[in-house]
Image (cartoon, helix red, strand yellow):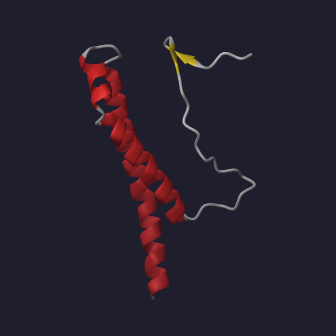
Amino acid sequence: MVDPPVWQGANLNFIEIEQHNSSDKSMSPIEILKQFNSCYVNIQTIAQDENWLLLIADKKIDPEAATHLGDTLHYLGEAMGCVEEIVEVKFNQEAE
């Protein structure tokens, strides 16, 4: 029997995520944007979660974790902005 993955001594419970296979059809820009948005909302929910904030306040995890999570949201937002431009151009072309 294989032991579950361990990170800093804690068992991780992984959320089953629908994965995109290369054998599947390609994602359209709007689908990519929707996936990014879903990730952003999930990460933002963690960043605002009371337990997450308590872990940081109680210094039970590296205080830089909050910074890393903020950076993740920032860069994900930047990536979303880039894809959003493509979606807007495509939408405008289809509207013409």
At horizontal 30% and vertical 33% (from top left) the residue drawn is: 49
Q: Position of residue 48 (x, y in %)?
A: 28, 36
Q: Position of residue 76 (x, y in %)?
A: 41, 46
- Quadrant the N terminus occupies: top right
The residue sitting at the front extreme is 1
The residue sitting at the bottom extreme is 96
Left or right: residue 16 versus residue 94 is: right
Left or right: residue 90 versus residue 42 is: right
Left or right: residue 71 versus residue 30 is: left
Residue 30 versus residue 45 in the image, above or below: below
Q: Nearer the viewer, residue 32 or 57?
A: 57
The residue sitting at the left extreme is 57
- Quadrant the C terminus occupies: bottom left
At horizontal 42% and vertical 54% (from top left) the residue drawn is: 80
The residue sitting at the top extreme is 9
At horizontal 45% and vertical 76% (from top left) the residue drawn is: 91
At horizontal 27% and vertical 30% (from top left) the residue drawn is: 50
Q: Position of residue 18 (x, y in %)?
A: 61, 47
Q: Position of residue 87 (x, y in %)?
A: 46, 68
Residue 1 versus residue 32 in the image, above or below: above
